[in-house]
Amino acid sequence: MTLDPATSYGRLSRVNHWVTAIFFLAMLLLGFTLANAELGRESRAPLMLVHKATGVLLLAWGTWRVSWRIRNGFPSPPAAHPQWQIRLSTIVHIGLLTAVLLMPMSGVADSLLGGRDIDMYGLFTIPALAENAGLEAVAETIHSVTAYTLAGLLVLHIGAALKHHLFDRDPTLMRMVRGAPPAPNAPGALPRGGAQPAN
């Protein structure tokens, strides 16, 4: 596994990004449906089973995803950006990576601490822990708050990526699509390990 280029994203980082995006978006939609839609027990039960089992897998995936990004660092911005954009990008990225861990971790804890087993697609079962109403309530609150926070961060993240692509015309988005390097004469190139990227 090779690290990313100094000003772009390597193939492994791009795979990590898009797999995470697809599965976490799907789980957010499913979670909001379970929380807000008026579903009967027969409809809700199988969806909840899938949600919980997939959450366990995403906890393992999220651990890998975050550890890879910490080890690899972030490429430098592909062009000169205002300092407020760089700071906001840093906050959004840290928030997204934190949510990638907190969402599945709190969901798994909510189930197990509530005395509910997690059925892993009928293959095996993760047994519940001793019930602890206080910790279960904390886990449930973290899970709910993180879900809405993640949704807001995704709006900012996607909006920023589209802004850079459609209006700024810089390679911020495309380097996550195909690893495109910044233009040779792009201003403001920073050394690796400098300011955080806008995407």
Image (tube, grey):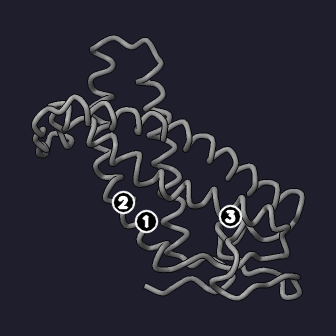
Q: What amino acid is labelled 1 in the image?
A: Arg
Q: Are marks 3 and 2 in contact (CB under 8 Å)?
A: no
Q: Are marks 2 and 1 in contact (CB under 8 Å)?
A: yes
The N terminus sits in image quarter: bottom left
Residue under label 2, please give it: 61
Q: Residue 179 at what x, y percent from top left?
A: 65, 76
- Which residue does the image show at 50% across and 67% down from the upper left? 15
Name above or below for residue 110 compared with residue 15.
Answer: above
Mark 3–mark 2 Cα distance, whole angstroms, equals 20 Å
Element under disc 3: loop
Q: Residue 107 at what x, y percent from top left?
A: 33, 40
Q: Nearer the viewer, residue 31 or 108?
A: 108
Mark 1–mark 3 Cα distance, whole angstroms, equals 16 Å
Left or right of 75: which side holds 98?
left
Element under disc 2: helix
- Which residue does the image show at 81% across and 68% down from the upper left? 83
Q: Quadrant of residue 95?
A: bottom right
Residue under label 1, please give it: 65
Mark 2–mark 1 Cα distance, whole angstroms, equals 6 Å
| Crowd class of label 2 (few under 14; some 14 to 19; many from 20; radius 10 Å) | some
Give the mark nearer the N terminus: 1 vs 3. Answer: 1
User: Which mark, by number, is residue 199?
Assistant: 3
Left or right of 186: which side holds 162?
left
Q: Residue 125 at what x, y percent from top left?
A: 12, 42
Left or right of 44: which side holds 126?
left
Q: Residue 75 at what x, y percent from top left?
A: 64, 78
Element under disc 1: helix
Q: What amino acid is labelled 2 in the image?
A: Trp
Name above or below for residue 121 compared with residue 197.
Answer: above
Q: What amino acid is labelled 3 in the image?
A: Asn
